Image (cartoon, grey):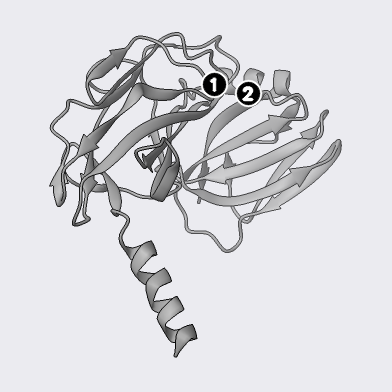
């Protein structure tokens, strides 16, 4: 009986935390692990509007952390979250400086958005900005659920992507493929195939030399092939399976 009571109290304690979700400006969900890709830095085309919804029965405090930044300094990324708007961000920092409250069963009223204006160096793509929306208690401790997602600027994926890949350490035989992608690597790294929504389809480690990535079991469509070398430099190219 004591054991049952103890488990019941634990369940009540866990379920008392608010359940937050992140929504785009149009109300569609941003799910855990989503990659939201843009191939432009123009405003408003590259602007991601979002809101945070509190589905719990009590108010909750929230902040947003810049978990990591890849191929950018964050100096030209605009982040508006809660009552603040910033013209640059830093990896590992959380915003705003003080958590803001969202009432029970409510969506925040702020004009939250992310917009990257950095076009990059012409070689190192994609630019990834990974964020985590999380809850805190009154003492500043993280509680409840969180949502982590990535804002991505893929750069201009055109013929110069071949030279970008080569500078990173990978060369391809072509961008029209059937059942496999043939490549030659001059650097160890990781090869990742993504769909046009930024979701990972396949990923494999790469060693120096010739290699093959099988595409036999994936649908005919456009994809983004991304190579990250051992020095964490990344380049991408658009390919088509036919």
**Nearer to the camera, 176 or 169:** 169
Tell me which residue sits at (71%, 22%) in the image: 168
Tell me which residue sits at (62%, 43%) in the image: 192
Left or right? Give the position of 110 relative to 78: left
**Residue 215: mark:** none
Which residue, as the protein is rendered here, is positioned at the far right? 209
Q: Position of residue 115 (x, y in %)?
A: 32, 20
Q: Residues within 10 Å of mark 1 (few under 14, many from 20)?
A: few
Whether residue 231 appears in this view of the structure is: yes
Q: Is residue 156 above or below residue 136?
A: above
Q: State if disc 2 and disc 1 touch (CB < 8 Å).
A: yes
Q: Position of residue 19 (x, y in %)?
A: 29, 54
Badge 1 marks a residue whose secondary structure is loop
The residue identified by callout 1 is 159
Q: Where is residue 210, by image quadrant?
A: top right
Tell me which residue sits at (28%, 49%) in the image: 21
Q: Position of residue 28 (x, y in %)?
A: 22, 48
Q: Where is residue 122, by image quadrant?
A: top right
Q: Position of residue 241 (x, y in %)?
A: 52, 49
Whether residue 46 appears in this view of the structure is: no
Q: Quadrant of the N terminus?
A: bottom left
Badge 2 marks a residue whose secondary structure is helix
The residue identified by callout 2 is 162
């Amino acid at each position: 009986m004591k054991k049952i009571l103890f488990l019941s109290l634990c369940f009540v304690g866990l379920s008392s935390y608010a359940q937050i979700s992140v929504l785009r400006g149009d109300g569609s969900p941003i799910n855990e692990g989503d990659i939201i890709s843009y191939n432009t830095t123009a405003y408003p085309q590259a602007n991601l509007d979002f809101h945070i919804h509190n589905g719990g029965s009590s108010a909750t405090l929230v902040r947003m952390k810049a978990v990591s930044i890849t191929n950018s300094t964050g100096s030209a990324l605009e982040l508006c979250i809660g009552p603040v708007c910033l013209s640059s961000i830093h990896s590992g920092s959380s915003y705003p400086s003080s958590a803001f409250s969202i009432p029970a069963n409510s969506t925040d009223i702020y004009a939250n958005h992310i917009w990257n204006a950095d076009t990059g160096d012409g070689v190192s793509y994609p630019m990834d900005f990974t964020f985590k929306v999380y809850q805190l208690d009154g003492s500043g401790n993280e509680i409840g659920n969180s949502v982590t997602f990535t804002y991505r600027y893929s750069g201009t994926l055109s013929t110069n992507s071949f030279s970008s890949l080569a500078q990173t350490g990978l060369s391809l035989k072509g961008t029209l493929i059937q059942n496999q992608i043939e490549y030659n690597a001059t650097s160890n790294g990781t090869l990742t195939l993504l769909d046009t929504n930024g979701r990972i389809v396949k990923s494999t480690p790469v060693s120096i030399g010739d290699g093959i990535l099988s595409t036999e079991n994936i649908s005919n469509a456009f994809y983004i092939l991304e190579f990250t070398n051992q020095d964490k430099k990344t380049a991408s190219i658009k390919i088509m399976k036919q």
